[in-house]
């Protein structure tokens, strides 16, 4: 299983701490959350699913506060 880094705005830090997610601080001021990757369906009821947004919703992170998602 791969891990994923979710680069978030610092405004999510309190929520990240409350959920007990592992995180680090990046040199550019972002909060980097490191979580296990999940399987994402391509479509639900015929509607395309954005894998980054699905991942963030799975981990209860506000996708509007996320800058980037990448494999660790």
Image (tube, rainbow, N blue to C red):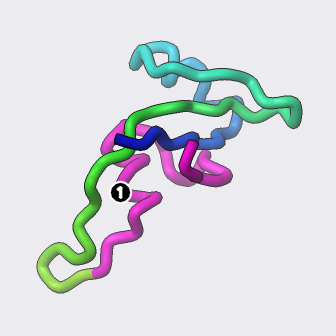
Q: How many marks?
A: 1
Q: Which residues are magenta?
A: 48-72
Q: Quadrant of residue 9?
A: top right
Report whether 43 appears left or right of 53: left
Q: Quadrant of residue 7?
A: top right
At horizontal 28% and vertical 60% (from top left) the residue drawn is 40
Residue ID for mark 1: 54
In the image, residue 37 above or below residue 45: above
At horizontal 64% and vertical 40% (from top left) the residue drawn is 8
Q: Is residue 68 covered in magenta?
A: yes
Quadrant placement of the C terminus: top right
Q: Is residue 25 covered in magenta?
A: no
Percent position (x, y) of residue 29?
A: 83, 31
Q: Quadrant of residue 61?
A: top left
In the image, residue 68 above or below residue 34: below
Percent position (x, y) of residue 68?
A: 64, 53
At horizontal 34% and vertical 41% (from top left) the residue drawn is 1
Q: Nearer the viewer, residue 61 or 24?
A: 24
């Amino acid at each position: 299983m791969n891990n994923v880094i979710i680069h978030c705005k610092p405004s999510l830090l309190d929520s990240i701490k409350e959920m007990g997610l592992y995180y680090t601080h990046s040199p550019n001021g972002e909060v980097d959350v490191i979580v296990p990757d999940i399987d994402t369906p391509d479509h639900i009821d015929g509607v395309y699913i954005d894998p980054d947004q699905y991942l963030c919703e799975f981990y209860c992170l506000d996708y509007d506060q996320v800058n980037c998602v990448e494999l660790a």
